[in-house]
């Protein structure tokens, strides 16, 4: 029996209906649907699912992002067309099984003992001999041998056929069949497809969507507290199937899960609440989490009973049919203390207390900014494989400062160098959003980092877009391990009186009092250079920069001939470095501190501070928020799921394994032996044997030889 690929053939009704029924129940239609599902699953694997729409716009552009959203390729496994294809596949495969199963079962019971004796000569594997026993005795002996070997045997005695058209003499037909599980493999494999699809439909969004269609539920698109959400956006604890996420902070409880939908969310009330007692996280040397686990207590909302559980990755907890998986972790509302470090001349320092996830208003003169506290990271592992590449140690005698500026504002690590991983301490992530809604993201480290040159620096990161890498401003730590030295020097540079005092000290130290004309000339050059660096003067009217080394470079390009720039730059940079050193000591005197000696350590700090002041002209915020203290509160993110289709899918997988094994490794074999009285020897039986197998291979050849030897006592050399 061969399985037909055609569908049910309805004899009555309109042609369109008959054609639709035939197509729906045909195997070719089921295979086409299965192919579409496979292609869709590949797309769902390659394309990230359930990402914010902006992420798709940033990665693929607005046209493709809109196309993906319209076709629901960003939520492919819950798309209406995907669920519809699954439903049609269930119907089509079920009809295929219903159409072919009766024929398969009928064929399993049929040993085909009615085959004509003359037909055995047409088989490729056959044998003939004469047995020294009567046909009936030989038939019963052969039947018993086959039955003891696991064959399904049937004996048929035939009378003299010469009176019915002369078809042949009387005799016995022994028909046997083995390997019937091969046909059952078809039913098992196709039944597995039905079971897996039904399980997928039950555990998918179909039941949840049905409640929004027929049970008065609607998707929630607003904001606010979960407790304030109306009942029409909530699903009952008896919901038969769902899959959502729930965030629980340490010391807190929650009993409502969030079910993400394409256009909003639904809230799922759980029959219990989850209390997070302690969250445990351990890290690899790379900074990646090695273990995170949650010690929780489950509180039954009806009886009030409490059940302690420990939930780890791949070790979920289960209660009242709901599986609780450890999904990830997040901040649970850590409290931080921040200090605003002025990065612009008009900015003032201030302190602020905040909570991660909250926002507050700050001012920048007449402009109002919103400070959004995004994240607190206690552990930050960075690559220090090329420590020299992380410093800002630019040779200040060079005039081409654009390249150096890019290298200083680049990433804090160089991935193309050998990795030397180091934890550089806590960091605070925040956003500053202006009145138009545009925001920049910042990441500032709490403690100074030694990047390899012996001068610890504070790393102040900024980026304009989430997909960009952070660019870091490196501010040197003073002898007290703080940014106060940098802040004092920057404030002194913005004060004309302090600049004048520093210039006077420099001129007095660098010139002979007997040559006042040289002192006046040197003072003028130093004043001009310092004013350009401080941003008090512009190199030209259309100058791009507002200070720093870029302003010096623009001045050189506008006023010094190309042939003389190298020599002039060397002189100007040397003057500026000496004046800035005097400015540093003046700022220390105003703070009641002793002057720094003119040694290598002081020069290293000064070089980094000068570069940081120069780079700070490009810092896009008036202040940098530095974290001075924090109290971490962690939260655990659980995935909660009630999946009745899981067991159905497991059963389907078992059926699929059994079915594929049966179809590939079980061979259907049939054997016939016709026994008739031999004309030359009345007490003997003329035996004709034929063997058939659905897949002919070396094993079937060996089995045929074995059967010949056992049933007919016939060796290969005696076979005809």
Image (cartoon, helix red, strand yellow):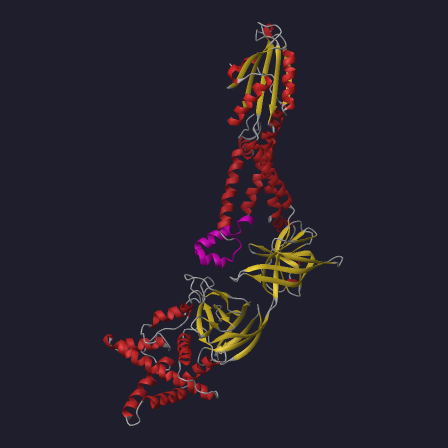
Measured along the vertical axis of the image, is residue 657 above or below residue 328?
A: above
- Is residue 554 rendered to the left or right of residue 472? left
Q: Nearer the viewer, residue 293 or 715?
A: 715
What span is colored magenta in the figure? 49-78
Placement of 173 over or under 107, stated as above or below: above
- Tell me, yes or no, whether the highlighted magenta stretch contains residue 719: no
Where, by quadrant of the figure, is residue 397 drawn? bottom left
User: Is residue 302 shown left or right of residue 163?
Assistant: right
Left/right placement of residue 405 relative to residue 378 reads left
In this view, 459 is above or below 256:
below
Picture layout, residue 667 above or below residue 334: above
Residue 376: quarter of image = bottom right
Could you say which is closer to the camera, residue 18 or residue 266?
A: 266
Q: Position of residue 469 (x, y in %)?
A: 45, 64
Which is more toward the observer, 100 or 447? Answer: 447
Quadrant of the snapshot with the N terminus? top right
Q: Is residue 71 visible?
A: no
Query: Residue 692 appears at what percent x and percent y?
Result: 54, 22
* Residue lying at 51% horizontally and 49% vertically, measured from the top left: 45
Q: Give the residue furthest to the bottom.
A: 514
What residue is drawn where x is 41% and y is 87%?
498
66 drawn magenta: yes
Find residue 492 and report its image quarter.
Answer: bottom left
Return the x and y of residue 417 as percentages of the image width and height: 41, 62
Prevailing SS of the magenta stretch: helix
The answer, for residue 395, to whether it is visible in the render is yes
């Amino acid at each position: 029996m061969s399985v037909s690929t055609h569908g049910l053939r309805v004899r009555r009704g309109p042609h369109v209906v008959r054609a639709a029924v035939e197509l729906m129940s045909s195997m070719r239609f089921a295979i086409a649907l299965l192919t579409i599902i496979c292609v869709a699953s590949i797309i769902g694997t390659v394309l990230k699912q359930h990402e914010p729409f902006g992420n798709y716009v940033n990665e693929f552009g607005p046209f493709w992002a809109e196309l993906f959203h319209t076709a629901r390729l960003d939520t492919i496994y819950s798309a209406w067309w995907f669920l519809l294809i699954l439903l049609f596949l269930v119907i089509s495969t079920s009809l295929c099984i219903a159409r072919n199963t009766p024929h398969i079962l009928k064929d399993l019971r049929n040993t085909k003992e009615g085959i004509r004796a003359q037909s055995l000569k047409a088989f490729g594997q056959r044998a003939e001999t004469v047995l020294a026993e009567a046909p009936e005795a030989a038939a019963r002996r052969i039947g018993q041998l086959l039955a003891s070997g696991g064959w399904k045997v049937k004996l048929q005695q035939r009378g003299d056929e010469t009176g019915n058209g002369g078809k042949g003499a009387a005799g016995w037909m022994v028909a046997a069949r083995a390997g019937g599980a091969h046909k059952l493999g078809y039913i098992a494999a196709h039944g597995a497809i039905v079971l897996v699809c039904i399980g997928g439909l039950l555990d998918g969004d179909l039941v949840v969507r049905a409640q929004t269609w027929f049970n008065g539920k609607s998707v929630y698109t607003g904001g606010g507290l979960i407790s304030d959400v109306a009942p029409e956006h909530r699903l009952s604890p008896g919901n038969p199937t769902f899959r959502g996420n729930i965030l629980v902070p340490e010391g807190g409880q929650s009993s409502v899960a969030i079910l993400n939908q394409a256009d909003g969310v639904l809230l799922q009330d759980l029959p219990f609440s989850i209390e997070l007692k302690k969250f445990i996280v351990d890290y690899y040397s790379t900074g990646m989490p090695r273990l995170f686990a949650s010690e929780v207590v489950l509180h039954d909302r009806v009886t009030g009973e409490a059940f302690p559980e420990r939930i780890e990755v791949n070790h979920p907890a289960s209660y009242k049919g709901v599986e609780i998986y450890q999904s990830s972790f997040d901040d649970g509302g850590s409290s931080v203390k921040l200090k605003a470090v002025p990065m612009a001349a008009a900015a003032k320092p201030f302190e602020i207390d905040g909570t991660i996830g909250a926002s507050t208003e700050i001012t920048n003169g007449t402009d109002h900014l919103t400070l959004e506290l995004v994240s607190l990271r206690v552990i930050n592992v960075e690559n220090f494989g090329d420590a020299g590449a992380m410093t800002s140690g630019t040779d200040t005698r060079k005039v081409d400062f654009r390249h150096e500026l890019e290298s200083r504002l680049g990433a804090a690590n160089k991935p193309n160098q050998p990795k030397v991983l180091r934890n550089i301490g806590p960091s605070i992530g925040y956003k500053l959003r202006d009145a138009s809604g545009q925001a920049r993201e910042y990441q500032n480290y709490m403690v100074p980092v030694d990047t390899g040159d012996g001068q610890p620096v504070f790393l102040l990161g900024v980026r304009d877009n989430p997909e960009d890498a952070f660019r870091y401003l490196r501010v040197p730590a003073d002898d007290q391990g703080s940014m106060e030295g940098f802040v004092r020097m920057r404030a002194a540079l913005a004060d004309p009186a302090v600049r004048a005092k520093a210039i006077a000290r420099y001129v007095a130290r660098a010139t002979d009092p007997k040559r006042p004309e040289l002192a006046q000339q040197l003072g003028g050059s130093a004043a001009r250079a310092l004013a350009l660096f401080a941003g008090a003067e512009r190199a030209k009217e259309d100058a791009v920069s507002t200070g720093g080394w870029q302003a010096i470079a623009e001045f050189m390009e506008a006023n010094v001939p190309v042939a003389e720039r190298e020599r002039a730059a060397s002189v100007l940079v040397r003057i500026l470095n000496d004046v800035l050193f005097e400015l540093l000591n003046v700022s220390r005197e105003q703070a009641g501190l002793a002057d720094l000696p003119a040694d290598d350590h002081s020069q290293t700090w000064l070089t980094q501070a000068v570069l940081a002041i120069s780079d700070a002209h490009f810092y896009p915020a008036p202040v940098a928020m530095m974290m001075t203290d924090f109290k971490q509160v962690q939260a655990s993110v659980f995935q909660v799921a009630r999946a009745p289709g899981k067991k159905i899918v497991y059963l389907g997988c078992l059926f699929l394994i059994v079915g594929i094994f049966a179809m590939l490794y079980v061979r259907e074999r049939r054997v016939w032996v016709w026994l008739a009285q031999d004309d030359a020897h009345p007490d003997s039986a003329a035996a004709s044997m034929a063997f058939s197998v659905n897949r002919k291979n070396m094993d079937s050849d060996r089995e045929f030889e074995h059967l010949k030897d056992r049933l007919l006592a016939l060796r290969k050399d005696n076979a005809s």
